[in-house]
Amino acid sequence: MRKALLISVFVLLTSLLSMRTLAQCSICTKTAQQMGEKPAKGLNSGILYLAFAPFAIAAYVGYRWWKNNSD
């Protein structure tokens, strides 16, 4: 249990703290290229920020479900 939790935290932090994460679809990439470098980085960060919440909620629900069923 503790080992699995440590591995999942490590994977999560590694994926969140990676230097260059591309989170844009092809249409957003073309739009970002037209805006310039600084707004494109902001757009990419916004996409990652908005994508984090549903994954965090799903992880919490999954953890609670797993914890209640493991007893």
Image (spheres, rainbow, N blue to C red):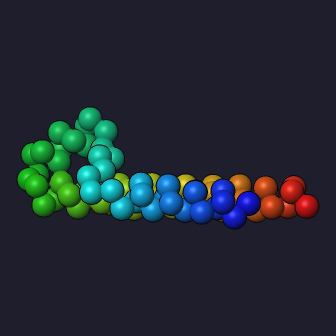
Q: x%, y% of residue 62?
A: 71, 55
Picture quadrant where residue 6 is located: bottom right
Q: Is residue 54 visible?
A: no
Residue at image point 91% right, 61% down: 71
Determine whether, in the image, residue 70 is placed left or right of residue 47.
right
Residue at image point 27% right, 57% down: 19
The residue lying toward the viewer, choosing from 4 and 26, is 4
Picture quadrant where residue 39 is located: bottom left
The residue lying toward the viewer, choosing from 2 and 59, is 2
Instruction: Locate the N terminus and report the quarter of the image it occupies.
Output: bottom right
Picture quadrant where residue 25 is located: top left
Determine whether, in the image, residue 38 is placed left or right of residue 69.
left
Q: x%, y% of residue 2?
A: 69, 64
The residue lying toward the viewer, choosing from 10 and 25, is 10
Q: x%, y% of residue 59?
A: 63, 57
Q: Can residue 70 be seen in this view?
A: yes
Residue at image point 37% right, 56% down: 48
Q: x%, y% of residue 36?
A: 8, 53
